[in-house]
């Protein structure tokens, strides 16, 4: 059974909840503009992303161009800062939120992928398929991207010398999850994926050169294979499609989306509802998300997701009304996010970030307090002349913090809100 819809017009607190989950946060005016509207229409509008432009960054005015990096390390820093800019300033925050979610699913890391165009193409695919019509097409495009081919070594997978790394993670981490495949499936998948690689962009001297996918027939094992119960002369495209459309993939992907948008510990009954929609629509992520973001389950789950470091930073900037920061400040914030446990494009492991309570420890909380101070009361902080309001900061107009903040200056009140437990949660 699919998820039950949320049938009431949105209250101001409903709207605040929606924007905290889908846009990192918003100003009081942006929240109140959604009040009274239909939940389904609001979700559909937020998911209606315009086509991506051809520039190096989607948002005009983004000051970071990774292609100007003088070294591989500088290029990576600019890529991270450029993405943080999009997370904080893009007019389509839900697309950036989804790209962040998918970067923790289809993981690549800059420890191995040190090529600017490959990272740019990877981010473009995350954004293009963020709420796309076909999860299978998403998985195939990612599988053939030079970033993934390099990160999980499928460019080393050749007939007679199989490399099973990508074949294993395709099943374990990207589609079905553990328990729904065998070691034979991993081996047979690797045979089918043999011969996939890329040309160009290799080595530290060529970090700005664009790599391109290649298929080398003489390195491909074209013999008969059996994979997830299907037999034949299966190709790489065949095994990605079979994995992405496997019935268990629906549940695995649905649980990922519920963890991102509903609760760190999702209700399995609600996950089953989204999984059924995933199967019924043939893996249409847009349909799954529209239903999820307008469901009673979504609006009934408040302050159940601990904001990750990057979400915390984006939330602070969007709640402040997107003040313009010096590019050096944004570069510093990306490094700060890393110290809090979330370095963009470099998850801790191929499993991505665990999230939830893993985001919170003594060191991370202290760093969050320092960040909050730097954005409100620090010497280089943007001027906070007006209190953003309890609804924008805390998601409710009936908080217990009001007496504690009475008499304080707007910047001081905002600082206290940023370090409160209510702001750490979405």
Image (cartoon, rainbow, N blue to C red):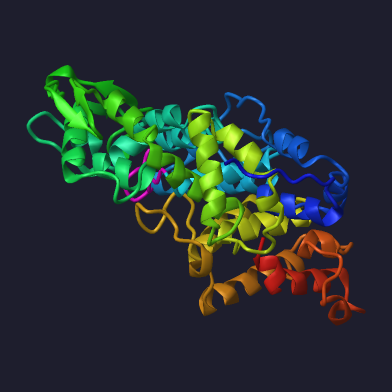
Horizontal arrangement in the rendering, residue 259 relative to residue 209 (left or right): right
Question: Along the line of sight, which residue is nearer the eye, 366 or 64?
Answer: 366
Report the side of 95 relative to 320 (left or right).
Answer: left
Report the side of 389 relative to 153 (left or right). Answer: right
**Residue at left offset 20%, top offset 38%:** 185
The x, y position of residue 214, in whole percent, is 27, 22
- In the rendered structure, the answer to whether residue 409 lies left or right of residue 306 reads right
At 28% from the left edge and 29% from the top edge, which residue is drawn? Answer: 239
Asked whether residue 20 is drawn in magenta, I would say no
The outermost residue toward the top is: 217
Q: Would you place residue 401 above or below residue 313 in this image?
A: below
Image spot of residue 212 (x, y percent)? 34, 24
Residue 367 falls in image quadrant: bottom right
Q: Is residue 114 magenta?
A: yes
Main SS of residues in magenta: loop
The relative height of residue 378 versus residue 309 in the rendered view (above or below) is: below
Residue plotted at (74% across, 46% down): 6
Residue at position x 31%, y 47% from top?
172
Q: Is residue 73 visible?
A: yes
- Residue 406 quadrant: bottom right
**Residue 62 seen from this side:** no
Q: Which segment did they paint magenta?
A: 106-115
Q: Residue furthest front?
A: 1
Position in image of residue 40 (x %, y %): 74, 37
């Amino acid at each position: 059974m699919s998820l039950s819809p949320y049938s009431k017009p949105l209250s101001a607190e409903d709207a605040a909840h929606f924007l905290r989950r889908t846009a990192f946060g918003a100003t009081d005016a942006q929240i109140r503009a959604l009040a009274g509207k239909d939940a389904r229409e609001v979700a559909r509008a937020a998911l209606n992303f315009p086509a991506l432009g051809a520039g190096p960054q989607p948002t005009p005015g983004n000051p970071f161009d990774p292609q100007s990096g003088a070294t591989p390390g500088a290029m990576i820093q600019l890529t991270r800062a450029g993405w943080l800019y999009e997370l904080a300033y893009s007019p389509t925050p839900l697309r950036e939120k989804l790209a962040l979610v998918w970067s923790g699913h289809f993981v690549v890391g800059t420890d191995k992928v040190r090529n600017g165009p490959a990272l740019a193409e990877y981010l473009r695919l995350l954004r293009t398929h963020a709420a796309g019509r076909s999860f299978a097409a998403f998985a195939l495009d990612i599988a053939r991207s030079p970033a993934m081919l390099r990160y999980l070594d499928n460019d080393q997978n050749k007939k007679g010398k199989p490399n099973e790394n990508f074949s294993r993670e395709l099943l374990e981490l990207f589609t079905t999850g553990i328990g729904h495949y065998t070691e034979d499936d991993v081996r047979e998948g690797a045979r089918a994926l043999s011969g996939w690689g890329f040309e160009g962009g290799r080595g530290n001297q060529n970090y700005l050169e664009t790599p391109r996918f290649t298929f080398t027939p003489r390195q491909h094992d074209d013999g008969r294979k059996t994979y997830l119960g299907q037999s034949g002369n299966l190709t790489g495209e065949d095994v990605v499609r079979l994995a992405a459309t496997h019935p268990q993939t629906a549940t695995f992907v649905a649980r990922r989306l519920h963890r991102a948008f509903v609760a760190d510990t999702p209700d399995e009954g609600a996950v089953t509802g989204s999984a059924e929609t995933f199967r019924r629509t043939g893996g249409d992520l847009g349909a799954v998300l529209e239903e999820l973001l307008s469901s009673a389950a979504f609006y009934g789950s408040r302050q159940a997701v601990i904001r990750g470091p990057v979400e915390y930073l984006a939330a602070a900037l969007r709640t402040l009304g997107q003040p313009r920061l010096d590019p050096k400040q944004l570069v510093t914030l990306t490094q700060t996010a890393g110290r809090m446990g979330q370095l963009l494009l470099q998850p801790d492991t191929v499993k991505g970030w665990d999230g939830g309570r893993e985001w919170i420890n003594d060191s991370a909380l202290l760093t969050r307090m320092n960040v909050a101070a730097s954005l409100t009361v620090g010497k280089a902080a943007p001027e906070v002349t007006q209190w953003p309001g309890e609804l924008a900061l805390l998601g409710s107009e009936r908080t217990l913090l009001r007496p504690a903040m009475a008499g304080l200056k707007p910047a001081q009140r905002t600082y206290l809100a940023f370090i409160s437990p209510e702001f750490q949660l979405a």
